Image (cartoon, coloured by chain):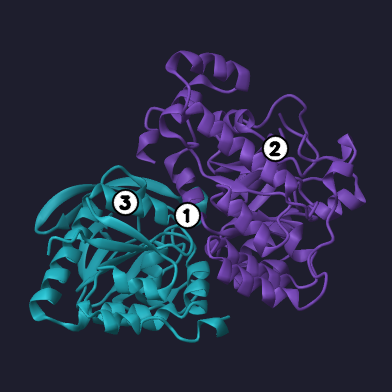
Amino acid sequence: MTDPLRIGVLALQGDFALHARALARCGVEPVEVRKPAQLADVDGLVIPGGESTTLLHLLSTWEFVPALERFHAEGRPVFGTCAGLILLAREVTSPAQSSLALIDLAVERNAYGRQRESFEARGEAVLGGRRVPVEMVFIRAPRIRRVGPGVEVLARRDDEPVMARQGSVLVATFHPELTADVTVHAHFCEMVRRAREGRAAAGGPGDAGHERAELDPAARGGAA
Amino acid sequence: MDELSGLRVADRKHIGLAEMLKGGVIMDVTNAEQARIAEKAGAAAVMALERVPADIRREGGVARMAAVAKIKEIQETVTIPVMAKARIGHFVEAQILESLAVDFIDESEVLTPADEHYHIDKFAFTVPFVCGARDLGEALRRIGEGAAMIRTKGEAGSGNIVEAVRHMRAVVGGVRRLTTLGAEELMTEAKNLGAPYELVRWIARHGKLPVPNFSAGGVATPADAALMMQLGAEAVFVGSGIFKSKDPAARAEAIVQATTHFRDPKVLAEVSARIDRQENSAMAGIETSKLAKDELLQTRGW
């Protein structure tokens, strides 16, 4: 277990480079992921901010959805910010669009308004049982409208949930990657480290190379 | 972005929106139907304008901000960010666009300049601005005025990538050069560039612009888009290249794929093949070196 953690950042579109930098600051090796097969080599995945319609389009073209579902089923953690949260939520409104449904939340897109209504705030999160201050930048952000029973709210702003976790899935409506504060990323890295240790202890399927190779969709040429 | 503290540049939330658009394609659209096609093809944002640059070039006359009704129609059609162009120096067009809650204002040389001396004071607005630049000095003057994003100008409506390449190389090369200079050389360099000293010093230390740097003006094919990305563009604007082609929806989609997979020649070949079936489907394009000086859009602004 001396291997450094490798955490993927979905690099189809969006602020993936800033997430990669935040992960590097946490001492983790970030890996830009543009093809589903690359998921085999990473212990966790960040889905960055960007445009959720664009990301959804590229995810479906490259047949990422089954690979991501399997990645999640193997217990590998996923962290989504803003558009990433929209892709991970069970239900999306304004307008309705499909999603991976890996966390039991309902989110409303662009729920504060257009860019003119984007804002910054200082808030508090509860991470690993500790209350920590968090700098929050909201950009054309979604709002969480319903929280499922299995979901733990980790941070609120004005009594509204802005960060949440269900099992191995972590989400935030704001962008910690736009700040110098790596608290949230460090928390995610810790989730990934524990998940990897758990898989190793269980001798589970997660680390078997031959199984990982199956993530590569055979029919890529026919995509689009 | 945290390293920006202490530097007078656009708001973090505005530069942040530019960050969210990285790796994406921003497409010029003139109506709701085009906006719908663009969004469906995977555009990260659309740019609302009255006429695409190729038509402005052909028809001549004064090119102004798009009609308010058109902008509203486009805003109501798509959920991705909607940008719109204001004339250089026309701060009232910008005020109108701000009141419409446009997500980004492009103070653009594609429109006829309204002021021959001054660009808009972009700090006075609650929405972000993107501005064109041909070299590092011009980019830094615009950033100094509050632009949250730079796009290299290229030659809009030409369908010819050569000017976009020239400008991207000038900006990227200019940044690289600053990192090689000694501290005592920076003030003279700022004077020569006509750029704010604080920004010159910041770039010398960080080796990049303090705001995202996108490419515009001449992208007509997936290969053009990938070329600009490999040269250092962080996203791509496509103007006339899509809706002046014979296959807008397929071309838009192919350029989106090429911008994401810009380092993967296999993917580039694959997406190019999808739109090559129709002969001469890309816009015809212009040999920009044959254009008269007063026909160039890139020389507007300073």
Q: Nearer the viewer, mark 3 or mark 2?
A: 3
Task: Kindly indicate whether the residue at mark 1 contacts the one at mark 2 (C-beta within 8 angstroms).
Answer: no
Q: Residue at x 46, y 29 (%)?
A: B179
Depth check: give the residue in front, B121 or A60. Answer: A60
Coordinates of residue B87 in the picture (x, y in percent)? 74, 40
Tags 2 and 1 on a common chain:
yes
Q: Amino acid at mark 2?
A: Val
Question: Mark 3 falls on what kind of element?
Answer: helix
In the displayed structure, does residue B85 sit left or right of residue B142? Answer: right
Residue B133: x %, y % from top left: 66, 37
Q: CA distance from mark 3 to mark 2?
A: 35 Å
The residue carrying pointer 2 sits among few (fewer than 14), some (14 to 19) or many (20 or more) residues within 10 Å by Cα, namely few
A180, above or below B27, in the image: above
The quadrant the C terminus of chain B occupies is: top right
Residue for badge 2? B92
Tell me the purple chain.
B
The local secondary structure at tag 2 comes to helix
Colour chain A is painted in = cyan
Residue kind at label 1, given as amino acid type: Met
Report the amino acid beneath label 3. Answer: Pro
- Residue positioned 62% across, 44% down in the render: B151
Instruction: Same chain for labels 3 and 2? Say yes or no.
Output: no
**On what subunit does the disc labeled 2 rest?**
B
Parent chain of label 1: B
Observer-nearest of A83 and B218: B218
Residue highlighted by disc 1: B20
Whole-angstrom CA distance, mark 3 to mark 1, is: 13 Å
> Which residue is identified by label 3?
A176
Tell me residue A167's x, y (percent): 19, 74
Asked whether, in this view, residue A15 is left or right of residue A169, the answer is: right
Q: Position of residue B80 (x, y in %)?
A: 56, 63
